[in-house]
Image (cartoon, rainbow, N blue to C red):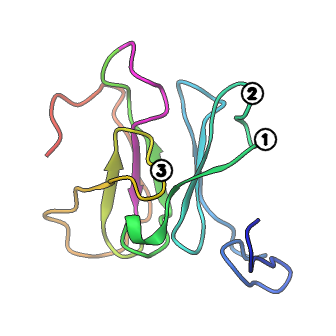
Amino acid sequence: MQNGDNPATGAGQWPFLGGSRFAVNPIDSTSIVMSSQAGRLFLTSGPTLGTGVQWFPIADPGDLDGTYAPAVAFGAPETPTAPLSDFIYAGTTGGKIFVTFKGGGVGAPWKDISAGLDGSEVRSSSRTPRAPTSVP
């Protein structure tokens, strides 16, 4: 919960009805990314702080396109030694898809990889079990 959030009245980024989408990292089940209705992304990760004990903002609305991101997913690490929860996709109701390879962070760069999309809402995502050989 943050200032201004009141789920009982539907105020803020966590409305009582409707909820928000989340994704559990299939390689590290202690890592969960969740999108708020205000267009923020939060991450909980690690055996001590993960699984919902503490949530850290990894994107503010201005870091993406300012809309809700219902399509969140973890990507496969590029190498066996890469951090397991740093590769994250976010698809938005504004019709864009963003990616971070560094775990995000408020003010951190998220790359817009929406070229070629028609601007329709991105409602879901799926991932490949292999790391990509290159990202546009």
Residue occupying image coordinates x 39% and y 36%: 75
**Tag nearer the camera, 3 or 1:** 3
Q: Which residues are magenta?
A: 80-91
C-alpha gap between disc 2 and disc 3: 19 Å
Alpha-carbon span between mark 3 and mark 1:
18 Å
Q: What secondary structure is found at the residue carrying circle 3?
A: loop
Element class at badge 2: loop
N-terminal of the two: label 2 or label 3?
A: 2
Task: Write down the residue under mark 1.
Answer: 53
What residue is drawn where x is 59% and y is 73%? 37
Q: Earlier in the sequence, mark 3 or mark 1?
A: 1
Mark 2 neighbour density, 10 Å: few (under 14) some (14–19) many (20 or more) = few
The amino acid beneath tag 3 is Gly
Residue 42 horizontal side relative to residue 125, left or right: right
Image x and y of residue 130, in percent: 31, 25
Q: Position of residue 51 (x, y in %)?
A: 73, 37
Residue 61 % position (x, y)? 46, 71
Residue at the disc numbered 3: 105
- Circle 1 residues within 10 Å: few <14, some 14–19, many ≥20: few
Which label is found at residue 48?
2
Residue lying furthest front: 107
* Dot 1 amino acid type: Val
Question: Which residue occupies 48% across, 57% down?
Answer: 106
* Relative height, residue 78 to residue 44 (above, below): above
Q: Amino acid at mark 2?
A: Thr
Magenta segment's dominant SS is loop
